[in-house]
Each structure stands twice: as structure tokens, then as C-alpha cells.
Image (tube, grey):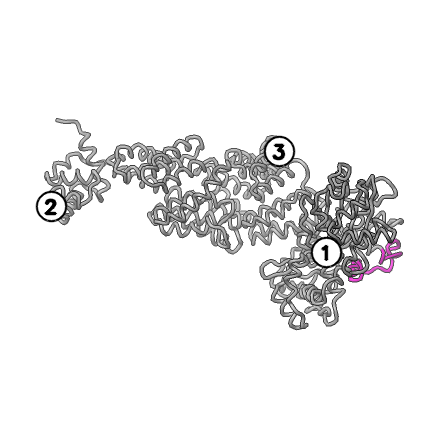
Amino acid sequence: MSGATHAAAPGPRLYDRTTELAAVARLSAGAGTGTGGVLFVTGDPGEGRTALLARAAHDFPGTALCVAAPPHRGPWSGVRSLCAALAPHPPAGRRALRLARGEAGLAAAVGSLTAGRPALICLDDLHLWDAHSRAALTTAWREPGSRWGGTVWLVSAARHHRLPDVPDAEALRLGRLTRDGARALLGDLCPVPPPAGLVERLLDETAGHPGVLAAAVRRLGSALVTGTGLTSRPLVDGAVLAEVYGGLVDSLPADSRRLLAVVALTGRTETSDPPHPPGRTEAHTPVAEPHGHVQADPPASAAPGRGTGRAGAGRWSQAYEVGLGAVLATARATRTSVEPLDGLIAGGLLCRRGDALRFEDPFLGRAALASAPTGITPAPSPVPASDPTLVRGEGHRADRLGPPPAVRALAPVVRGRAQLVRGLAALAGGPVMDAHEALLQAAELLGDREPAEASDARFLAMEAAWAGGDVSACLAALDPGKAARGTERDFVVGLRAALDIRLDQARSVLARVVARDGVEDDPRLLLRAGSAALVVGDTASAARIHARALVRARAEHRSALVPRVLEHLAYAELRAGRYSRAARTAHEGLRAAEQTGQRNVAAHQHAVLALVASVAGDGRTVREHAGRALDTARPHGLVQAATLAEWALARAEFGHGLAAQATARLLPLVRQGPRSGHFALRMLVIPCFVEAAVASGRRAEAREAAEEYAIWAVQGIDGTAPAQLARCRALLAPGEEPAYWFGEAVRRHESCGNDFERARTLLAYGTWLRRRRRPGDARGPLSDALVTFERAAAEGWAEHARSELRATGGTTGGVTDPAALGRLTPQQQRIARLVAGGATNREVADRLTLSPRTVDHHLRSVFARLGIRSRVELPGVVGRWDARPSG
């Protein structure tokens, strides 16, 4: 919320600090109750820590004082300054200093000087205080509050400073201003309003940073009012940033300052242009200018991250990642030590992501380069800005160029929409994490100017990260502070809770999103409601909501949206166990995706079709669809589609008796690590893995996975989970214990609605009973499983059930001539009956006093005369002989 947060004239005017002022108010209330307390406020240089402390002191109803960082860095200089502020007379100051150094400690000194009255002590720039004083303060803050009565502490520190561990202390991180807040601050800084165009340039380049905005206004002076004498060069130059960040940079050791400059220099291409990620070609999407000319859309100037208020961050930003190898090479060339690198990363000034580095604060790189020590000088651009490579489309060279001035001058909304188009293109048919970055940048550029489009961009960025299986990237796209009230905010808060494994909170919030589907007609909002239903395990609602979204998208002729809706609908039907519907939807979605060129959506539909084919037992179809899904999923980072495809292949392999191969394929999908499967599918795959692992003798791994699955099953996210957990326990249990767990699994299946999984449980139960030589008990579950598989057109699983049923002597619907019994000799009939009862050749030989070789010879003759292929078919034949009416 923009605007002044305090109406009294003497108090500093603050903007967009409602949350911070509320925390200060809570701290002040603690002074009145005599409980004390500590509140830490951190932020980058110029973000307003000192102003917040001044405002807190102004608003405090009792005694308040602000103590700045001491000018001298000697031991105890901070405590000396504090005691002098509390008791300005020298005797009292000396007494307080002795008391602070003594056994009683600083807490007793403060209590003595404030006489137990409510007081607010504001300490600014804690990171600049000497180590002795910081240690004494930390000890004082850890003391019980009664030691200093009603004194409360408001302490500011740089963001990179490690805060002391103080029980019950609260910490706040100051952020950047919104555009409206920055505009209001600019109004305070400029008594005479500047020209409108200049205001927009300032707001874009300062990116909501209050200190940078104030410094830029001071440097511009009269030019800000008249608009004369200004060029196309940046308004926020190195001198402005050196004024704001100079203290931070100068406080670092010389080696650290040199290394910061090296990182800034490595990512820099031109004096005022943003650096580009090394080794990566940026797609240049044409964007129409107001006068009809066409220019290349610029790469986004900053990747959103911690410390980045808006994506603009000036037109030169170090939020882009810089290759670590390039940094090391430049460091060697400039004879710069890289030893301070770990310290800069630990201090939060640099962020390391794999083999890349980036500045956490996009302004810090420019300030480091402007304040570079001797020996670090800016390198010239490797290609002149006038080089025609950009026009010729030579991306490998043009990527090193910054955007031309005409493109940099485009409005943020234009650049944001261009990034949105680029992100949609990558989401449809390119690497999904590239789409994620482009969409986040689009959301930042659109910001408050086009909130609906910015909201769509963030949701699409979340979908891209979800498809890529990146939880942290999903969370980066789900920013509650930027979500509007209502459905969007509930969706963001609920999904963040689900990703953080706070499922009870997620369920209650997302249930509100699902409940609003009846009043929503926009297919974009219906997609969010359907996604929320899937997250909370309400697959029936998910399918219904996505079906409504499909109807609306078609009615509005949104041909590009229809494939995505069909993708969501096919997956919802799959989760609900409606495999024939899922196959029909996926085929339709595949056609729509191919017609609109959405290769990533097509890959997901191929994966769904592969999983449906694995239910039917059609191995050839499984391999065809899974192969086509993986051909796109692997290079584009579609972890969700790849997991579905691998799961389908494993189910087909297990259905054909290749349990060991299926286990090896499923193992990476159920484990965590770089080769793991999708985070949202991992638990769904575990029951299949347990069954395959038990069949292949890997019981220890199966048991470990089942124990983890047990924790998931009680969360209520998957309706079939309790039944499948009982089946897993039955497969792993010893002795006669599986009978109980199989019975429990069948009972739980009655209420979950997935007939295919129920049939699989019945098949496993009947197989266990038959192997325990209880054929009569096994026939019921096996017959029920067979009927369900036949109804679901799961022919592969149905054939498995028929074989097991024949082995029990049950009827499978086959035809064998009862008169064939007369073609067998009495000895062959005896052998056939014994084998049908489950006896082995050795047991038959012992029973009839024959050799096993003779039994085997007779058995082959029996097969030939009865027209059957194996001993598993004998029980059914013998059962029909015994069922013939006599006479």
C-alpha cells in the first residue's frame, strides 16, 4: 500500500512499510508490559533502515534514543557510545562503561540508566560496531527481560551481516518499494514535479530502491526539473551507486572488493547494458514500436530473486548468472585471488548456483565495478554496438550485444508482454526452465501496470517449474506479496503450503479455491481451481472443473489454451482411475497440441497414453507413446512427462514378467536425488515399485519405500493410498499375516473408487492364496479380478488373472471337451489329477512309485491329448470333469 504511513509532520514519512511498522508497534507494546524484546531489521544499503529507526523513535510514547554506529572502531567503542547516549555526563558514562564491562553486564547497565522505565533503544548499522560491543549486546539480549525492565531494542544491520542468535527475537527484511511508493517518494524529493517521461525513466532505473532514487535525484539537480542536458545514458550511473553502496564496498577487505569487481566485469558487455548469461543464445522476439518500426526485444534486465524489487533494476543488472569458469579466468588475468569467494557467498553478497555466480543485489555489481581497486578496469565490448550481426540473425555473436537504445526506451509493459510471448513459446515447445525465467521476468515488468497479465505470467511460470520438477522454482513463482486477494491469493498461499509439506494448512486454503469453481467462468481461473483440487486429492472435482474449463475455452475460441486444458483434464482422469476417459481426452489433446505446435503438451499426452496402454497390457503401444514422450521430455526438462513415461514402461515390463527390469527402472523414480522422478508423482509410483521389488527379491528396498509411503498415506491427499499401503504391507509381511493386510486392502478399496487398483489387489491376494495351497479360497478374488480387468479392457492383466484362476481349478471361460478324459490312460488320469492339485513331478513320482522322467513323459502326453499348453491349465480341465453330471 503506497502513501504516507504517518500523518504527523515531524516524523519521517515512509512508504510501503506497513508490515515493518506493525512489527515496531508490537515491539513498543512489549515495552509497556515490561517484557522487553528485540527486533532486527536488515536490508541493502539505502533501503531505509535508518529512516525506519527514526520513525520508530518518533512514534514511541516513552523514552527513545537512536545510536548510530560509532565513528571509532576500537574495542568497546560501541558500548562507550551507547553509554554516553544513555547518560551524557562523563562520570555516569564512565560508571556505566565500567559496569558494562564488569560481571553485571550491559543489561544491568541499561537497567540502571533507564531506571526501569519503558524505553526504546535503536541501534543502527550493527555490522559496523566493534566485535567486543556486539558480543556484549548479544549477551545482554539473551538475558531475561526483567534485567532491564521495559527496555526494547530495535537494531538494524546490513543484509549480509549474520544476526546474533537471540531467543524470541523477530527479524524483518526490508524490500524495495512498489512503483506507486517510489513515485510518492519522488514527489517528496522533488518540490517541482519533473517531466513525466523523466519520472518514468527514473522509476524504471531505480527499480524501487529508495536510496538509489534519492541519490539519483541529488546528482541530477536542476536537470531533473528542466529535463535539459540529459542523454540516453543511464540516470543511475556508477557515481550514484558508489554514493549508496560505497560504504558497503569500502568496508570489505581489498581482496573481496577486487573479486566483486571481477565478477561484475565478467558479466559486463557495455557500459550501460545488461550482461548476458555466457554460453546461451537469447531468442530475439520482434516487438512493434509505437511508430511501426520493428526492433529485437531485449533480454530481461534482471532475473527475479532475493533483493530484486522489480525486474528493471536499472538497465544494467548483475542478477544474470555469470559462468564461474569465466570469473576464474578473469581473476587469473587480473591476478586476483579467488579465496574470498566462499566468504562473499556465505555473506550473501554473491549467490552460487552450480557453476554460475550472480549478485544477490542487482545494483551491487555496478557499485563494485565503479569502486574497483587499481588493476581492475572495464573491458571493451567484444563487438561494436553498430555491428550488423543482430540484423543478420547471427545469434552466437548478437547475444553478446546489449539491446539498442530504441529497445531500451520501450515501455516496461511492451517489454513485459514480449517476455510473456517468449515464455509462452518456450512453455509450449522449448526448455521449460527457460520458460520459467522468461515468465517471471514478464511478471516483474508488467507488475502493477497490468496486474492480470502479471498474475497469468506468475501462474504460467509456476506451471513451467512444476513440469520441470523444480520445487524451489515453483515457490519463486508463488509470491503471496504480489497475489491479489481472493482466488489468486488463496491458490498461492495454499500451494506454497503444500510444497512446504504443510498439508493441513494447504488443504483448508485450497478447498476455498475449489469451492469457487461454480462462480468462475474464466478458463484461466478454472485451471487454477482444478490444479488446487488435484493437489488436495479431490480427483473427481479436478476432472469436473477442468471439463468446465474446456467448455469455456472452446466457447471463447481460445485454440492455444485448449491443448493445455486437455492436458490437465487427461491427467485428472488418469488420477481418478478413469483410464478409458483419460485415453480419449489424451488423444484429443494430442491432436490439438500438434495442430498448434505445442510439443511439450504433446509429450505429456503421449505419456498419459503410455500409462493407459500399460493398464491394457499393450506393450507395443506403451513403448511407442513412451518413446515419443521421452524424445521431447528429456531435452526440454519435462520431468513430469518423463516420470509418467518411465512408469508406464516399468508397468508393461512387470506385466510381462520382467520384475527385475521393472524394479531397476522404477528405483530412480522413488528415490530423491539428481536422477529422481517428479516430486508430485514420487509417492504415486511407490506401490508399483514395492510390488516389482518384492517379486524380484529386493525386499529391503521395498520395505524402505513402503515405510515412507505410510507417512504419505495418512495425509489424505490420495484416496487410494490407504488401500495400496495395505497391499504393500501384505506383500512384505511374513507367514499368515498377509491374509489380514490383503483383507484390509480390499475393504479400503471399496470406498476409493479405483476399480483397476482394486482388481490388482484381488489378483495379488488370489495369487498368494493359491501359492499357500488354498485354491478354493483363491478362486473368488481371482474371478472378481478377472471380471474387472475384462471390463476395463486390461487384456494383459486379464490374461494373468486367467492363468492364476486356471491354476486353482477355477473356470476361466475356456472350452475343453469333457470326453477328452476318456482318451487318457488311468495312469495319466491319476497324474493329471495330482498335478492339478498342485503336486510337483517329484511329488507325483514318489506318490505313484515312478521316476520323475516317467512322470514328465506321461504329462507331455496328457497335454497333447487335452490340447493344452502347460500344467497351469490342468486344474480348470479337471474341475470340469468333476462337474459333469454322472451317467
The circle drawn on residue 293 is: 1
Say if the magenta span includes residue 236: yes
Residue wearing tag 2: 850
566 or 685, nearer to the observer: 685
Question: In front of the other: label 1 or label 2?
Answer: 2
541 or 580, nearer to the observer: 541
Q: Earlier in the sequence, mark 1 or mark 2?
A: 1
Residue type, mark 1 in image: His
Residue wearing tag 3: 520
647 or 169, nearer to the observer: 169
Q: Earlier in the sequence, mark 3 or mark 2?
A: 3
Whether 192 is drawn above or below 798: the answer is below
Q: Earlier in the sequence, mark 1 or mark 3?
A: 1
The circle drawn on residue 855 is: none
Residue type, mark 3 in image: Glu
Say few, some or many: other residues with alpha carbon within 10 Å of mark 3 (under 14 / 14 to 19 / 20 or more): some
Range covered by the magenta-colored residues: 218-243
Question: In whole angstroms, how far apart are the C-alphas of marks 3 and 2?
Answer: 79 Å
Q: Is residue 174 visible?
A: no
Whether 249 is drawn above or below 657: the answer is below
Q: Tag 2's secondary structure?
A: loop
The residue located at (50%, 36%) in the rendering is 716
Question: In whole angstroms, how far apart are the C-alphas of marks 1 and 2?
Answer: 97 Å
